Image: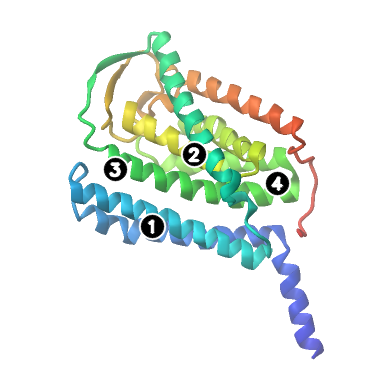
Amino acid sequence: MATIENAHSRIETLRRNAFFRLAVMAAFLMAWLVGFRALVVPALRGLGEPGSATGDVARLVGALAYAGGALLLYRALVGRIERRSVVELARRPGIRDGLAGFAIGTALSCSAIGVIGIAGAAQLSGFGDGSRLAATFAAAIMASVGEELLFRGVLFRILEQAFGTFAALLASALLFGLAHIVNPDSTLIGSLAIAIEAGLLLGLAYVVTRNLWFPIGLHLAWNFTQGGIFGPASGKEPHSLVRLAFTGPDWLTGGPSGAESSILTVALCLALASAFALLAQRRGEWKAARLRLRLD
C-alpha cells in the first residue's frame, strides 16, 4: 500500500514539474502537427491542384481537420496534465479577440508593405489571378493554429509560470525564430527578424488578452495577407493578388524572405509589441521574474 502511495506521490510531483509539462505537451502536439503534415497533407495535395475546386476544398477541409485535431489535443492535454479548464481558448471573448487579432494583423501587414513602398523599396509590378488564395488561406490556418498552440499555448505559457513574463518572452521568441530557419531562402538574420517581430509580438498578444484566439487571429491574417495578397512570405514563391517589385538592399526590402525580414517591418512590429507590453502592465498581466518549477 505504501509503495502505491509513493508511486502516486512521485507521479504527482512529476506532473507538476514545469519542464515535464512542457516536454510532454510539446511532444504530443509536435507528433500531431508533424505527423499530419507528413502523412495527410501530401495525400490532400494529390486530390487536385491549387485553384481547382477539388484541390481547394481538399486543402481547406484538411486545414480545418489539422487545426481542429490540434485544438482538441491541446484541450485534452491541459485537462489531463494541468487538471483545469482551458480558459485561454474560451469562446467568450475568444471570437471577439480572434476577429480583433485578424483585423490588427491585416492592418499591420498592409502597413509594413506601405512603409517599404514609401521608402521607395517596393513598387507595384502587376496583379495575379488569385488561383491560390484558398490554398494560401488553408496554409495560414494550419500555421497560425499549430504554431500558436505550441509556442504560445505550451512553451510561453508554461515558461511564464516558471520564470515570469520577460524570460518566457525571450525564450519563446528565440525558439520561434529558429524554427523558421528551415524555410526556403531563410537566413540567420531572417530568423532573428521573425523572432523579434513575430515571436515577441505574438507572445505579447497573448499576454495582453490571456486568450490564444487573439494571437491566432493576428498570425492568420499576417500569413494570409503576406502570402496571398502581397507575397512572398517566409521565402515561399509568390502566388499573390498583387505583384510587387522590391529594389534596394536586403535589410530594407527583406531580400528573398520577403517584407517580413525588412528592418522597417521589424520596427513596425516592435512598436506594436511595445504598446501591447504597456497595456499588459497596466492590466496587471505582466508576471514578475521568479523561479518556480513546481506548478499548481
Residue 83 falls in which quadrant of the image?
bottom right
Q: Quadrant of the C terminus?
A: bottom right
Q: Which residue is mark 4?
A: 160
Please tell me whether residue 196 is drawn above or below residue 87 in the rendered image.
above
Q: Which residue is mark 1?
A: 65
Q: Which residue is mark 3?
A: 135
Please tell me whether residue 216 is drawn above or below residue 201 in the rendered image.
below
Q: Amino acid at mark 2?
A: Gly
Between disc 3 and disc 4, the foreground one is 3
Q: Amino acid at mark 1?
A: Ala
Give me the C-alpha separation between circle 1 and circle 2. 18 Å
Residue plotted at (76% across, 30% down): 282
Q: Amino acid at mark 4?
A: Glu
Q: Amino acid at mark 3?
A: Ala
Residue 262 falls in which quadrant of the image?
top left
Q: Which residue is mark 2?
A: 217
Q: Position of residue 223 (x, y in %)?
A: 41, 35
